[in-house]
Image: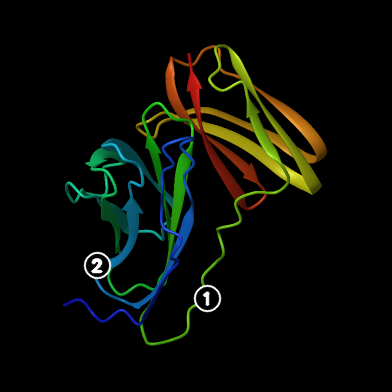
Amino acid sequence: MKKNILFALFLLAGFGLSAQNGVLNESTYNTIAEWADDVPGEATFTNTTGEERTFTWIKRDISLPDGWAAAFCDPVLCYDPSTVSQSFTLQPNESDTVFVHIYPSEFSAGEAVVEMLLYEEGLTDTVRAMFNFCIALDAVECSLTSTNELSEGQINIFPNPFTASTNIELELTKATDVQVTMYNVIGRQMYNRNYGLLNGRQQLNINGGDLPKGAYLLQLYLDEQLITRRVIKH
């Protein structure tokens, strides 16, 4: 039987889509709970435009202890942990909730981090929602690891869309380990490069000539920070 959740903190920023420029807000959701076989978290998404819109989400298990699993429920269905991407439609000004469910292994405590990337077809902006869970065997204080530092310096990706290559322009304030990965819309890694330690103003060239045409999620790792952007290959 599910035990009571001891504490849940939901940042109220939520998600919104601007009809003019497609800007999406990002949020972090922290849940501290006593052990149960199903520990839920939730985020509310609002279509703030005057038109019906279809959104696609991608699930990424950033950090799960051995034997744990995570699954999403969107406004359409609840999915098993193997499902990494689905779409749903919202009417104008309609709000709905996306749930993430953590399934810990039997009587094991730990921390889990699950990422939801949400975008609208045809736009390059992506919302990134981070779900942080600390699950304890008893009513003890948990200390959640902070994972919501989204940027350092100014980030610019150009051209986007691109045909053969694109560039990441950024300015780092200290020596930083830099890595770039790209995933297609079903979550398969299509590009990965570790640039090592960099500092100051940088321009990283991403050779995407061999990539199939389509949309990709570009992830830029700066030490422990993670920045996610959507890029399109024409």
- As rendered, which of 195 and 74 lies closer to the eye? 74
Question: Which image quarter is the N terminus in?
Answer: bottom left
Q: CA distance from mark 2 to mark 1?
A: 20 Å
Amino acid type at image mark 1: Ser
Q: Is residue 165 above or below residue 20?
A: above
Image check: 29 left or right of 78? right
The x and y percentages for residue 36 are 26, 74
- Between 100 and 14, the one nearer to me in the picture: 14
In the image: residue 178, left or right of residue 189? right
At horizontal 36% and vertical 77% (from top left) the residue drawn is: 33
Instruction: Residue at 63%, 29% (x, y): give it.
Output: 157
Q: Which mark is residue 38?
A: 2
Question: Which structural element holds mark 2?
Answer: loop
Using residue 89 as the reference point, say whether residue 25 is left or right of it: right
Secondary element at image label 1 = loop
Left-right relation of 34 to 131: left
Q: Which residue corresponds to the image point at 43% horizontal and 25% vertical from the top-left?
A: 215
What residue occupies the far bottom of the structure in this picture?
139
User: Is residue 204 in view from this perspective?
Assistant: yes
Q: Is residue 171 above or below residue 102?
A: above
- When asked about the image quadrant of residue 57, the answer is top left
Q: Residue at x 77, y 40 (%)?
A: 171
Type of amino acid at the residue the image marks with label 2: Asp
- Say whether disc 2 or disc 1 marks the residue closer to the N-terminus: 2
Mark 1 Cα-neighbour bin, 10 Å: few <14, some 14–19, many ≥20: few
Q: Position of residue 202 (x, y in %)?
A: 78, 33
Quadrant of residue 55 in the image?
Answer: top left
Q: Residue furthest front?
A: 50
Question: Which mark identifies residue 85?
Answer: none
Q: Is residue 136 depicted above or below 84 in this figure?
A: below
Q: Which residue is mark 1?
A: 143
